[in-house]
Amino acid sequence: MMKRHLASVSPWILAAACTLLTFIIGAFAVSNYNREKELMTEALVQKGLSVIRFLDTGVRVSMRAGWQGRRDMSTQSAVDWVDHVQEVINQLQEQSDIHFVELLDSSGVVLAATDSKRVGRKYDTDLEEFVQKSIGGDYVFRMHREGSKQGFQIARVFTPRLRGAFPGNPQNMRMPAHMHRGGNDAGSTPALPGAVNKGFAIVVELDLEAFDNAVARQLWQIVILSVVLLLVGVGGWLSLLTLQGFRGTQNRLQRVRAFNDMLVGSLPIGLIATNSDGDVQIVNEAAERISGIKAESLLNRKIEQVLPEELYQNFLEHSGEDSHLGARAAEREIQFADGQKRALLLTALTVADSQGEFSGDVLLLQDISELRKLEGELRRTERLAALGKMAAGVAHELRNPLSSIKGLALLLKGKVPEDERGKETADILVQEVERLNRSIGELLDYARPGQLQFTAVRLSDVLNKAISLVAVDAEAMSIKLTTDLPESGDLIKLDEDKINQVFLNLLLNAIQAMPDGGELTITMATEAAGVGCEIEDSGIGVAEENLSKVFDPYFTTKSDGTGLGLALSAKIVEEHGGTITMSSGEGEGTCVKLFFPFKND
């Protein structure tokens, strides 16, 4: 879920995040850069001030050493202490990071310098203005760049002073109290004579290499951070594009998979697919319906463990990585766990991947039971139609000779009134002609299209009427009649006489199938599409091989039967748009099911 949420983030949000990150890192880099410059500048200022303090201290030490006990300080000239300043400055020449140190008077003339050639020269206007800013203040500094030469300059007012007692003073006298703390330096002593009323300044120029190196390092850090940010942004952008592409591909794959699942699930043909190890991976609804086995009990199991033997044997015969026969079809009649036999058209396929490697097998199951049933009914209908045409022709040809034979038999009977044997023979001849004529009439009734007279009746009323007609025969043969016929059934349009003939024929057949008594059960039920009923007996039953022939004309297992009763009954039911089926087993009784649909006017 989290990956889906991240994948749905708009690229503009990432762009905004990168922009914000750029701003933050940029501000941080600029702050660090300025901070680094401030720290380096402060370090240079402190170093410059340290040089000036060193110079001040060195001058005082040098002056003490060379004072030689003079007490009258008013006679000491400024030039005397400048020599001491020059001596200290000369000591600073050894420092490689100091470009120059110079002492200037108030007019901008160099009094002492690390470069002796500059002593006595006057500063240029720019430097003089810079030095003048230090007069009356603490100190000033600047970055001075002139062509390829660059340095850090710091200037400060310089007033030479002497701390403590004067060397060589025989009374070891100290300076008068009113002369103490008169300069810029806290705790300093009064200025030397000749320097009190003059504005002197010290200018120190330091090397900027360390400063430039630090700034360059900071700039490199900024560049590296910028490059890293760019790489992170580009990487994040590419990652998002990749993630979105992956999500799009995943969505398309899910849609294709959903479509395939829907397609496989909606196929009217059963499909069972296994992987290369023989484990069931796919089972659609049609396969569940045909096999009567739930998909949950099939998936991830070996096919031979969960399917009937006839089914998986056919599957295994045409499967495996050594099979290259394409689609192989076979027709089998298989009995499943629900006890029903189904005629199946089985098609086995071997599946290979894009490299031609064996990936698994697919078994297609098509229930052709109804097709085979329809084919049987079609063949039966064609056979009965041909038989009907032939019967109509034969009946037409036989009736005229039979009429002549019957007339001659009656004539002979009248001519031998005294001959009992002759009269008996003539009577037998007439009876047989009449029986043959009745058979021809039944055959014609079967062959000609029925003329049905439909009326709205309740099927229960028709059944009750037929049952009342055979009740005496059933009682005589010790047959128990059990009925379940709801009286409030829906009206259905039927030819009452024809349907009564069907029920009588079925009930009489059931009674005749129980010569030693038994039970005859008649039930009826109203459904949404029509009304159905069942007539079940506990008689001798019908052999399995004869079930497919019981509705054929002239097929009978009774010695005195014509074989047209069930055929005519089936024809009447079919003319009503209904169905009639029989299930039986030898010695197990027989059950006949009829269904009559509601007719729409």
Image: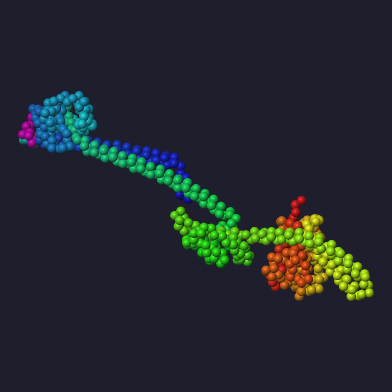
Q: Looking at the magenta stretch, what is its main secondary structure? A: loop
Kindly tell me whether residue 207 is visible in this rendering: yes
Side of 75 where 559 appears, left or right: right
Name which quarter of the figure residue 376 lies in: bottom right
Query: Residue 31 in magenta?
Result: no
The structure residue drawn at horizontal position 15% and vertical position 25%, both measured from the top left corner, is 122
| x, y percent for residue 349 | 52, 58
Give the extent of the magenta segment.
63-73
Considering depth in this image, is 562 or 551 the residue closer to the camera? Answer: 562
Query: Residue 72 in magenta?
Result: yes
The total number of labels drawn is 0
The structure residue drawn at horizontal position 24% and vertical position 38%, both measured from the top left corner, is 213
Q: Please, is residue 20 above or below residue 324 in the view?
A: above
| x, y percent for residue 406 | 87, 66
The structure residue drawn at horizontal position 73% and vertical position 59%, both measured from the top left corner, is 385
Q: Please, is residue 87 above or below residue 525 in the view?
A: above
| x, y percent for residue 66 | 7, 34
Q: Please, is residue 515 above or below residue 578 in the view?
A: below
Considering depth in this image, is 414 or 167 the residue closer to the camera? Answer: 414
Name which quarter of the figure residue 224 lies in: top left
Considering depth in this image, is 432 or 296 the residue closer to the camera? Answer: 432
Kindly tell me whether residue 177 is visible in this rendering: no
Considering depth in this image, is 540 or 374 the residue closer to the camera? Answer: 374
The structure residue drawn at horizontal position 84% and vertical position 64%, both measured from the top left corner, is 401
Side of 177 where 558 appears, left or right: right
Side of 87 where 437 appears, left or right: right
> What's the coloring here?
rainbow
Side of 176 where 323 appears, left or right: right
| x, y percent for residue 533 | 74, 62
